[in-house]
Amino acid sequence: MTLLVLDAAAFMLLLLLGLGLIRVIAGPAGADRILAVQLSGTTTVGLLLLLAVRLEEPALIHAALLFVLFAALLALAFVRRAPPRGGDR
Amino acid sequence: MTALDSLLALLLLLLAARCVSARSLLQAIVAFIVLGLLLALSWVRLEAPDLALAEAAIGAGLLGVLLLGTWRSLPLGHGNERIPLPWQGLRPALITTGCTVLAVLLTVALHQHPEQAAMSGLAALDQLDAAGVDQPVTAVLLNFRAYDTLLEMGVLLMALIGTLMLDSPLPRDTELPARTMLPATLAQLFLPLILLIGLYLVWAGAYSPGGAFQGGAVLAGAGVLLILTGFGEGDGRDGWVLRALLAGGALVFTLAGLLLIPVTGAFMAYPQGLVTPIMVLIEFSLALSIALSLLLLYTGTPGLRRRGER
């Protein structure tokens, strides 16, 4: 029963990640896409934590931790330069 | 789980197609980063947590930052023009068709290949007690196939030297903005955590997925954070210390292999009892070299300095 709930939750999360891809692909602005990537990253963290419990593989928690840390780096790399570029699409 | 795997495969294909058919550089980069996330999940489903960790640290972390940084550094107007679709024009169309045919043929060949028992993998698991570490992947990388890992370290150094030999294609006027409040706080919050987790991953390689490559990539991420927040920057000059640290991984690895020949009688064989300390020493020196090489690949300069120093 617990396994079924975990499986269903993981599937729902991946489905939501897929829905979030609409913003990754449609945009329209560059910031929209990067925010959608951040959302995908957060969903992936959730998925990894769920799978860590489901597959009894604690090392996946490390992978989730890495995604959390590097998400901030990614956002920082995107906004790094002060003057916004024209037509960030 | 089948439903999850099918959806994962579908999304992977969708994003891979998006990567090659995106109409601008940023769109392609963004699709590639999300592809990295899904690849990590795929490695998890393929029961390869080591690769999931590597993908998390290198694929989704450093590579995304590297690509976004390059995109940011392109002169205005560059990288914003629409990229033609892969099938527009004769040459791209030919390449696309060729790659598709190759992919189909490879899939067919893979399915016709008779399934073989992984003899070397089983042999490695049998000998795990002699390896000095509890994690089979680390045992293979640092002991049973140490030669491969040493050469990989050489490849990374070669890549760095090759990059440094290239003249920077980017204009010199792409200076970073002055330090701002938010990123400085970010660095103070995140740097200790990233360093801690990087070192922990190197250490954890002995008994759980992790190791020099994953940990080194995380440590490189800490350096990238310092550069992004304006605490450090690339320097045109390098020093002996930096060079020693860069070569340290390969040197320690080779020396440990050579110096123990009189004791063990073979290159890269380690005496019983001393295996674990030697492994840890090699692991940490490799991690440091990998971290610095990746960081210098990011800055594209031979040296590093604190911001403002000359």
Image: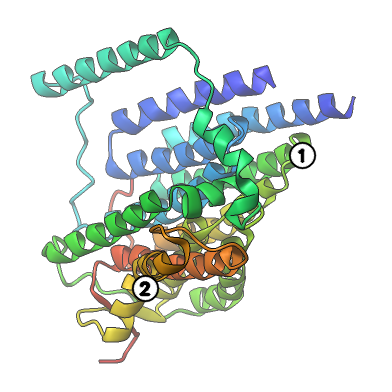
Label 2 Cα crowd, 10 Å radius (few <14 / some 14-19 / many 20+): many
Q: Chain of mark 1?
A: A
Secondary structure under badge 1?
loop
Q: Residue at x 46, y 58 (%)?
A: B269
Q: Residue at x 71, y 31 (%)?
A: A10
Residue A11, position in %: x, y? 69, 26
Label 1 Cα crowd, 10 Å radius (few <14 / some 14-19 / many 20+): few
Residue B248: which numbered mark, if any?
Answer: 2
Residue B207, position in %: x, y? 66, 55
Q: Chain of mark 2?
A: B
Going by the numbered disc 1, the residue's amino acid type is Glu
Q: Residue at x 13, y 65 (%)?
A: B165
Kindly tell me whether residue A20 is visible in this rendering: no
Determine contact: label 2, label 1, CB under 8 Å.
no
Residue B225, position in %: x, y? 46, 70
Image position of A6 with respect to A60: above or below: above
Q: Residue at x 51, y 71 (%)?
A: B281
Of residues B125 and B64, the one nearer the viewer is B125
Image position of B198 with respect to A5: above or below: below
Left or right side of B136 for B307: left
The N terminus of chain B lies in quadrant: top right
Kindly tell me whether residue B255 is visible in this rendering: yes
The C terminus of chain B lies in quadrant: bottom left
Residue A56: which numbered mark, if any?
Answer: 1
Residue A11: which numbered mark, if any?
Answer: none
Going by the numbered disc 2, the residue's amino acid type is Gly
Image position of A52 with respect to B156: above or below: above
Of residues B308 and B105, the one nearer the viewer is B105
The residue sitting at the bottom extreme is B310
